[in-house]
Amino acid sequence: MYPSVIRFLLLSSFILLAACASTKVQQEKLPCNIPASFNWDTTTVYKASISVMNKNFSGLIIFNRENDTDYRLIMTTDVGPKLIDITLTPKGYTKNFVMAQLDRKALLRMFWEDFGTMLGIFAKGKPGYSDLGTCCYPVSKNFTSCYITSDLKSFPLSAYFVQGNEKKTKINYFCAVGQQPDSIRIEHLALNMSYFLNKLN
């Protein structure tokens, strides 16, 4: 129905399966002692620009907060048809609707990792590691979400999704302190792939 969008997202999943390289985490401790704090609206809508190997796709990404830990992620094209609708939880994701052509485990897990870290659904309870400036929370075996703050500001300036001691994904938040991000950049460090989200009022 929307062949260019479908081909684009399928390309993303194939790249994920093929990628082996990643970026090593710095072994020295980064400064931090304040856990990341989040205060998302019940519904937040971002205009999304996604780039994979110099190919670009744009659409809308909608986050519906269902409770303190669970969020519903809806991805649509610019003209409205729904592509993906999944519920993100700290333990995994549930498919509400996924176009058959996009129903790939690697792609859906990537969205769970990226947007789960971005929304902070893994940053609950006591961090597995914290130091002045950095707080890391276990996600699953060998996977961690880390949030890096500045001074004593509790809202994260950046975040990483980490596998073992290797950074897979970097997230930068652009916002006034204590407010929801106006824009967010998500970058896969071992892949030629990134998202840029701009909040719609």
Image: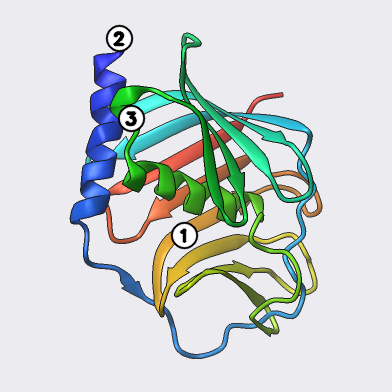
Residue 33 in the image, given as x and y percentages of width and height: 75, 80
Of pointers 3 and 1, the one earlier in the residue sequence:
3
Task: From the image, tell me which residue sits under label 1.
Answer: 170
In the rendered view, does 190 fall on the left or right side of 117? left
Quadrant of the image containing the C terminus: top right
Q: How is the structure coloured here?
A: rainbow
Q: Residue at x 45, y 75 (%)?
A: 142
Q: Residue at x 64, y 49 (%)?
A: 119
Report which residue position mark 3 lands on: 102
Image depth: mark 1 or mark 2 in front:
2
Which residue is under mark 2? 1
Q: Residue at x 27, y 54 (%)?
A: 191
Q: Secondary structure at mark 1?
A: strand
In this orientation, does residue 5 appear?
A: yes
Camera sees residue 55? no
Look at the picture and state if 53 lies above or below 1: below
Q: Earlier in the sequence, mark 2 or mark 3?
A: 2
Element class at badge 2: loop
